[in-house]
Image: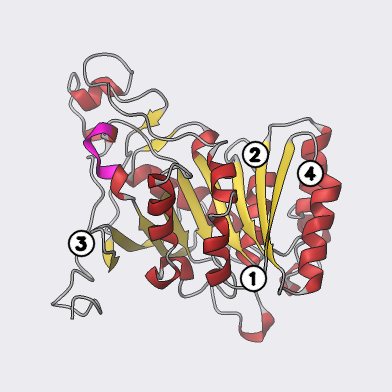
Amino acid sequence: MRHYEIPPFSQKGDPVSYGLVPAAAAKPGSALGAGRSGDGAGAVSAGTVLPTGPRAAFRVAHTLDDGTHIGVVTLHGKQSGYTGRVWVWAPKAYFDPQYARSGFPVMIALPGGPGYPYNYWMDPSLKLEQSITKWYRAGKSKPFLLAMPVLNPATDAGGLYWDGSDIPGQPKMGTWLTEDVPDLMRANFRTLKSRDGWAFMGSSSGGFASLKAVLKYPDRFKAALISGPDIVPDSPLWHGHAAQERENNPQVLAGRLIARKGPDVYLGFQVGTRENSSTIADVKQFIATYGRGPVHTELNVIQGGKHDAYTYVPGMGHGLIQWISAHLAGPTPSS
């Protein structure tokens, strides 16, 4: 029963939190209070931001074999006005005493397909969380915190999807992904102040949203790991809003970033050889056209790989997770 996570034989549904009290609750002169200014014994590491609160009411969605929990909460986004679910995960390293005063990098993982009412990256059978642990132990990856929000505000019935964007007259899914979800992570986890500690990953439509988010907000996010993505916005909801659609086109955004010469972003793409040929061609064309100047790109072609998450997770371990991690900051151990 525990293996199948059936209550009361498992912790599924139980409350779960991720450590430190919010920074605002730290008493002046205490280790946590001193850490805000970076001085005094027990100060937090430079660049670390302690949890700001309010603490979210996470519940256990899954418990992994190493004892870590995938939590879930229903979040009302203050900036977007949208309310949806977000799954989170912290690696075991997050609870290691040597990193107790250090922030961790955040990776916002976006699914393909409807991305509603679930984000499939929270499914332990895909082994994203287990793989991050394995890669970190092998020295290939940073020990990322994962945020796994719903991508769309509804199912894709009728062919509707929202391109991870603020389409006029629609729920503000772009603001949800790039402001509300990061705010949730800052409220509940030790994070890093710099954009060096913030990245996206995604597949298919989630790959498009990840690519677009980093190119649109390179001052907030430094890197993305992008699998089998769409390259341009193509939601039918853009009809009649050509100007706004252009502002969410990765080709336009990449061109502007190149023209203003930065800041540097790192975009790791992967495609399987058994994907739709147009997807492969579009990714290669984007890299050939825009992979220059501040837009750094890398491509992993997965032999025999298909357009699915079971292809993309192991594919990440063949170089891209190491490449992305090399350009991001990690936790700093205590002296």
* Residue stretch in magenta: 94-98
Q: Residue furthest top?
A: 40
Q: Label 1 is placed on what type of residue?
A: Gly
Q: Along the horizontal axis of the image, is 120 left or right of 276?
A: left
Indicate the quadrant where residue 72 lies: bottom left
Q: Earlier in the sequence, mark 4 or mark 3?
A: 3
Label 2: state its secondary structure: loop
Classed neighbour count for the residue bearing mark 1: other residues with Cα under 10 Å, few (<14), some (14–19), many (≥20): some
Q: Earlier in the sequence, mark 3 or mark 2?
A: 3
Q: Label 2 is placed on what type of residue?
A: Pro
**What residue is pinned by disc 4?**
291
Q: Earlier in the sequence, mark 4 or mark 2?
A: 2
Q: Give the distance between the C-alpha atoms of the residues marked 3 and 2, in whole angstroms.
A: 35 Å
**What residue is pinned by disc 2?**
218
Q: Earlier in the sequence, mark 1 or mark 3?
A: 3
**What residue is pinned by disc 1?**
305
Q: Give the distance between the C-alpha atoms of the residues marked 4 and 1, in whole angstroms.
A: 23 Å
Residue depth check, mark 1 versus mark 2: number of the one nearer the observer: 1
